Amino acid sequence: MNKQGRQIAIIGAGFSGSLLAIHLLRQSQPEDQIYLIERGAEFGRGLAYSTGNPGHLLNVRAGNMSAFSDRPDDFLDWLRALPDEERRGISTTADHLTFAPRALYGSYIQHILAQEIWGTGRTSRLGLVADEAVALHPAGRGYQLEVGSGRLYEVDAVALATGNFPHGGSTRGYVANPWGPDVVTLLDQDATVLLVGTGLTMVDVVVSLLDRRHRGQILAISRRGLLPRTHAAVRPWPRFLFPMTAPRSIGALLRAVRDEIRRVEAKGGDWRAVIDSLRLDTQDLWAGLPLEEKRRFLRHLRAWWDVHRHRMAPAVAARVMAALEGGQLTIRRARLGRVTPASAAPNDTELQAEILPVTGGRPTTLTVARVINCSGPVSDISRVEEPLMHALLDAGQVRPDPLDLGLDITDRGAVIDRSGWPSQTLFAVGPITKGAFWETTAVPDVRRQCERLAGHILRSLISPEKPELALSNRVGGWMKPGSVDRMRLACR
């Protein structure tokens, strides 16, 4: 360890990485140094909050979106204090039930990161590196972290906060990454569009098409054909499933949830209150399940959980339902088969898409102007098209979790290597830890994870703990602090 203080690198500066950096700054010593490494254009936004479309709303109410558990109204207060020209339709009387634009939340993350750097006098303790991390070379008890420019950073510990990984392989007319900047551009307004997936990513693309006054048919397909449910104001319901006493089978858990919903509805309540009451316990309930029960959940219940747990904002749902009722949007239970060019003409971008019904029947072929993959991010890290992840896998420094949902880690966030040993210097946070924690995308879940991980990293570097048992089921260049224009952080 560096005698001048602990050197900690965070790879990825979206919500997870930025919040972890803030908690490390708050809990560490003045001589410690944090490096926040981001290959994208901006620090603080990440994939989820980089959209420029004000019609893309958060799927969680403003009252639950504070970055700090000890300041539950922080985001709401920031939202109300924005200048009129920046609020984008959000009233100064915004309340806890408000669904704000996701782009605004990205600005909020940038704000709290900037405040933590310049508003607290910790400018010199956080280094912002605008470059891509490509490898971790073991060096003593720590690492030499290599970035794309070739520079090496000597660090004692590394936290992977890489966020969600988009699909690769876009071709003519086929869009693999639905979060890219040109997903719905250059489309004829009357063209037919095929969306693969019917979850919240599909909802975003539909909103983008409607915002561009698209008139053509939109077909969305998935194996279940389920649409996310809509948020509604409900009375809170007390916790009823406690990890220490909860059943250890998916069937028994499902029955318990259904029984509780019947009790709520008998009292005039709403099923949403029951699902919301599980939020504090979901990660621990997941951790208590045997591996085969987790697999059973993924096979049979995952799609149902997703549409009930991750819901649409009411304003967004109204637009989607109007498109459904008007016949412009159709949702079908089907899979995508072969996709081939409609003709050999070089300027013809139309495709012939084979639609395979899930419930049986003959395949059909649809001529479409564009196919957009809305099936969600890549979770199997062996298929991720990222140099760093390839390097870590090849070196045996990481391995996939048993469910192929992300990295194999301990319950404290320590990464487990190929041989099954947990690291004391390499950690992970955010969506890449889904296999261990399941719910790792919503702000309250990630906030809790970052608070805990920051303390664990710092403690492990002060006095290395005994190696944890791996309880696995599978035996840029340097950016100087203060360069506001270059990193485009808004400190209000």
Image (cartoon, rainbow, N blue to C red):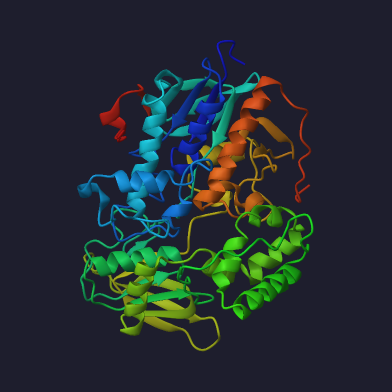
Q: Is residue 73 above or below residue 59?
A: above
Nearest the viewer among 76 and 480 is 76
Of residue 39 and residue 271, the one placed in the foreground of this image is: 271
Rendered location of residue 423, percent (x, y) = 68, 32
Q: Position of residue 84 (x, y in %)?
A: 21, 49
Would you place residue 163 above or below residue 358 in this image?
Answer: above
**Residue 168 seen in the figure:** no
401 versus 388 height, above or below: below
Q: Residue furthest bottom?
A: 361
Q: Count every numbered label the image shows and give the total.
A: 0
* Left or right of 209 on screen, residue 145: right
Q: Is residue 484 left or right of residue 335?
A: left
Foreground residue among 218 and 243: 243
Hey, which residue is sitting farthest top in the picture? Answer: 3
Pick the front one: 293 or 274: 274
Left-right relation of 337 to 370: right
> Considering the image in quadrants, where does the N terminus appear?
top right
Q: Residue at x 41, y 24 (%)?
A: 120
At a point 56% along the width and 23% down the height, the residue shown is: 28
Q: Quadrant of residue 241?
A: bottom right
Residue 442 is situated, as x and y percent measured from the top left of the image, at: 51, 53
User: Residue at 28% across / 57% down in the picture?
Assistant: 54
Residue at horizontal 50 percent and vertical 75 percent from the top: 226
Q: Quadrant of the C terminus?
A: top left
Residue 159: name its quadrant. top right
**Quarter where residue 119 is shown:** top left
Residue 20 horizontal side relative to residue 470, left or right: left
Residue 15, x across and y down, in percent: 45, 43
The answer, for residue 315, to whether it is visible in the render is yes
